Image (cartoon, rainbow, N blue to C red):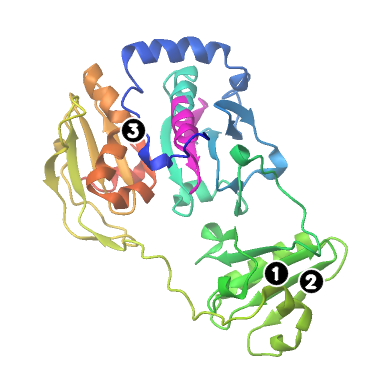
Amino acid sequence: MPEEKLSWKDTNLALIGSEIDRKVKAAAAEIETAWDGVGQEEGIRVWRIENFQVKEWPQDQYGEFFRGDSYIVLKSYRTKNSNALKHDVHIWIGSESTQGEYGTAAYKMVELDTFLGGIPVQHRQVEGKESLEFSRYFETLEYLDGGVASGFRKVEPTIEKPLFFCVKGTHAKTLKMMQVPLSITSMNEGDSFILCASKDKVWCWHGKEARPIEKASSNAWAEKLCTLGTVTTLDQGHGDEEDKEFWEYLGKGTIAPAVPDDAEVCQFTPVLYRVDGDAMKPLEKVAYGTLVEKAGADKKCLKKDALDDSDVFLLDAGWEIFVWIGKGADVHEKIAAMGAADRYAEMEPRANFCPVTILKSGQETSTFLSFFD
């Protein structure tokens, strides 16, 4: 009987962070060859989880993510005021990633944190809902079908089996190029689409309500794909229907109206929870903020003294989740911190699709602090 493919959202991370687990990680990190030379200079490193192991991801594929996989991304940098290296370590979870891949990525993220002396800030990113910080690491975020579990590798388009992509985003650093089924039913009037049949046969089609940034970026990406020819650009309502070859690939059907932007949370009342060391106990709501705007500059709606250094807290900011670990938190609370976002998602499913940042006391980011006065 084939092994059941469980969703990453069903993963139980409760054991991550225990004292025994920490010692195992420290020993394992010392012999994990993937970490050789890591964290010694500024830059970005990417690894993919393959059969429960960490494998280096090719630099020329940075920004490409298979939906069926989980990845680890390390950003090492220096600030203007210090020569010491700082680190942000992220796990990226594809929408079709398995429970085992997510669990391994989370475990290895903590292992890498241990290897780097507990300095990094840890993050979880979910396909399509990445933080702006993460998106800025790459020129393009490209989502591809398949993954290592299915033996799927990046394939070159052919005349018989072209690749079809949707380009969507509101500004340069949030644009995404997503592989979609080769069908007219994948199209809508509000986005741009790239059809790549070969290196000399590429089309770029723009819906009549596509944004200028979507058009410009899709044209540029199409040019990169079309290395042996010239891109054919089509604009909806301006003779695009005359390109018979393009439409033959897409079949019969109707192009959908423009799809509104994802139902992102633009207004939210932040809520602060205390995380108990007993994973069976619910999170304790300790403070409410006031309604804030995602695009607003002033979000200071909670009191900083609500953060007790002897505890662990979870802040639901609506569009991002933060877990804060106080210096004096006991071992059980630290264990619970690692799975706090997953526990919270059981009561608030929206949290499954929010970026998560885990902060130790003293590591507070400007974004986290922006909610406190």
> For the magenta stretch, what is the residue range?
80-107
Tell me the tag on residue 231: 2
Label 1 vs 2, first from the N-terminus: 1
Q: Whole-Å distance between the Cαs marked 3 and 2? A: 46 Å
Please tell me in which quadrant of the rendered image residue 314 appears: top left
Q: Position of residue 316 (x, y in %)?
A: 25, 47
Please tell me in which quadrant of the rendered image residue 362 appears: top left
Q: Position of residue 146 (x, y in %)?
A: 61, 47
Label 3 vs 2, first from the N-terminus: 2
Tell me the tag on residue 359: 3
**Three-letter code for the amino acid on which mark 2 is drawn:** Val
Given residues 30 and 280, the one toward you in this image is 280
Q: Position of residue 262 (x, y in %)?
A: 41, 65
**Three-letter code for the amino acid on which mark 1 is drawn:** Asn
Mark 1 and mark 2 residues within 8 Å of each other at the beta carbon: yes
Q: Whole-Å distance between the Cαs marked 1 and 2? A: 8 Å
Magenta-colored stretch includes residue 91: yes
Name above or below for residue 359 compared with residue 244: above
Name above or below for residue 122 compared with residue 370: above
Label 1 vs 3, first from the N-terminus: 1
Q: Give SS at disc 1.
A: helix
Magenta-colored stretch includes residue 139: no
Q: Is residue 200 visible?
A: yes
Mark 2 burial class by Cα count in 10 Å: few <14, some 14-19, many 20+: many
The residue shown at (57%, 11%) is: 31
Tell me the tag on residue 219: 1
